[in-house]
Amino acid sequence: MRKVLILGSGPNRIGQGIEFDYACVHAVLALREAGIKTIMLNCNPETVSTDYDTADALYFEPVVLENVLEVIRREKPDGVFLQFGGQTPLKLSLSLQREGINILGTPPESIDRAEDRELFRRLIEELGLKQPPSGTARTKEEALRVAESIGYPVLVRPSYVLGGRAMRIVYDEEELLSYLSEAVSVSYERPILIDKYLSDSVEVDVDAIGDGEDYLIGAVMEHIEEAGVHSGDSAASIPPYSLSQEVVEEVKRQSKLIAKALKVKGLVNLQFAIKDGEVYVLEVNPRASRTVPFVSKTIGYPLAKLSALIGMGRKLRELVPEVFERIERGLSHWASDFMPAGKRIYSVKEVVFPWNRFPEEDPVLGPEMKSTGEVMGVAEEFGLAYYKAQLAAGSRLPMAGSVFISVADRDKPKVVELAKGFIEEGFKVYATSGTYRFLKERGLEVHQVLKVSEGRPHVVDMLKNGDISLVINTPTGRKERSDAYHIRRSAVQLHVPYATTVRAGYAILEAIRCFKKHGGRLKVYALQDL
């Protein structure tokens, strides 16, 4: 009897999704159905993959090379799956290959090509695709030079992190110096990576699957938050709700091109930024991603199960012949090869945060992942699907009342239509001095409220008195314990819905409009019926 070893995602911590456990368990189920014995190596007590009756054998050990080699020596499996446990097992690919271990699915050299920054940059250039300008720095002086040549704002991060830890968007030289002295140590062993931050761009996630010959797009997801928010922390919509079909088709074309060049066998996740109609490649992960459960539920095909079977030599044309038939007849959905054309259903993924457990933490979204769970809303219109997703995440959007808007200078021009939209829906709009003046000068009926530092009654007093039913507040920088910090913390503690990006603000407005249009009624869908 054939047997395989599956590596899990390791210990449980914030910034590491339980979604990888879903992929591991689905892989086990698919392989068991195919008559293959499964061995699970993982050390997370919160997972289903470590239940005693999930796999045929369980090794509850840290996912490190020494333990993996010991289990292989003892069990003698036919091969090892790395792609279901996220980034932790993927890092072992080259070490395992050097030991002569059979890696099932995407070959280790392809994994290295996607993970190694310089190799990946060359691949994208060879394919004739675009990437944001980037560089690597090993000293403070080098970091300043690279950032200056790329042009601010830049996205900076250590080269050794998981879950986006210690990543930051930096807007000037002073912020960069502060980051280098406070957050990270730069050295030849631990360089930092610097990328041009594409302001006002839309981020797109793609989950795809391939068998070395054929490649299919699971789904193209449009992030609701701006690019720069970690993909694990951003709400996302299938199909995209603001991108043109032409842009989505180009994203699909580039995804298949990259997956084929990397010789992907199984799952692959790709991330793009769309700015002024141009598509930029951000990163590619030749493994299961956090969005695989969300995509699988939306399209009705278990991608992790298909990926496990591909790793054992099966072909996509044999596993899902009806999908290829639809594609050949031009009947597949524009945002997914797996869904039939004409399917008018929006699925919105929203994330759940542990802010209440961390009373000192600023509840603002950024490149560092902080979420601990996900929910999903399904409806025939984007606004309704987003409303349901918010409800599932514990946030009931108001249908009337007052909206407080206070945004960074760079965001002020973007909130004019947003404020106007809320006023048209019958909301009273409050703002602090800067945003108030900006909106007032453009002829909008807004009301000024004091900042916490300006005296009383201020905005936090209004929140405590129940006079504000929605907060839209974007961060201005890294000034901790600022007015904005107190506003965001108060919103969390008082369970007032809030958004820390402008795009999320517009999504909330659309959700409120849609919910009102449908008379405050929601239709319940069973996934089986979809």
Image (cartoon, helix red, strand yellow):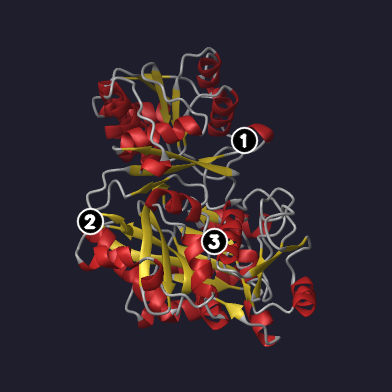
Q: Residues within 10 Å of mark 2 (few under 14, many from 20)?
A: few
The quarter of the picture where residue 344 lies is: top left
Q: CA distance from mark 3 to mark 1?
A: 24 Å
- Residue type (three-letter) at the residue carrying disc 1: Trp
Mark 2 or mark 1, earlier in chain: 2
Quadrant of the drawing holding the N terminus? bottom right
Q: Which residue is mark 3?
A: 156
Q: Which residue is mark 2?
A: 245
The numbered mark at residue 408 is none
Q: Residues within 10 Å of mark 1 (few under 14, many from 20)?
A: some
Mark 3 or mark 2, earlier in chain: 3
Residue at (31% x, 63% y) in the render: 322
Residue at (26% x, 47% y) in the render: 343
Q: Secondary structure at mark 1?
A: helix
- Between 168 and 524, the residue placed more toward the observer is 524
Query: Looking at the picture, does residue 300 appear above or below residue 486?
Result: below
Q: CA distance from mark 3 to mark 2?
A: 32 Å
User: How far across and down, in percent of the image, does residue 287 sit?
Assistant: 53, 67
Classify residue 369 as left or right of residue 512: right
The quarter of the picture where residue 320 lies is: bottom left
Q: Which residue is mark 1?
A: 355
Find out whether the residues at labels 3 and 2 contact each other: C-beta distance under 8 Å: no
User: How far across and down, in percent of the image, does residue 183 sit?
Assistant: 66, 56
Q: Secondary structure at mark 2?
A: helix
Residue at (65% x, 65% y) in the render: 88
Q: CA distance from mark 2 to mark 1?
A: 37 Å
User: How far across and down, in percent of the image, does residue 127 sit?
Assistant: 34, 80
User: How far across and down, in percent of the image, does residue 277 sit?
Assistant: 25, 59
Residue 387 in sight from this viewpoint: yes
Q: Nearer the viewer, mark 3 or mark 1?
A: 1
- Between 450 and 344, the residue placed more toward the observer is 344
Mark 3 or mark 1, earlier in chain: 3
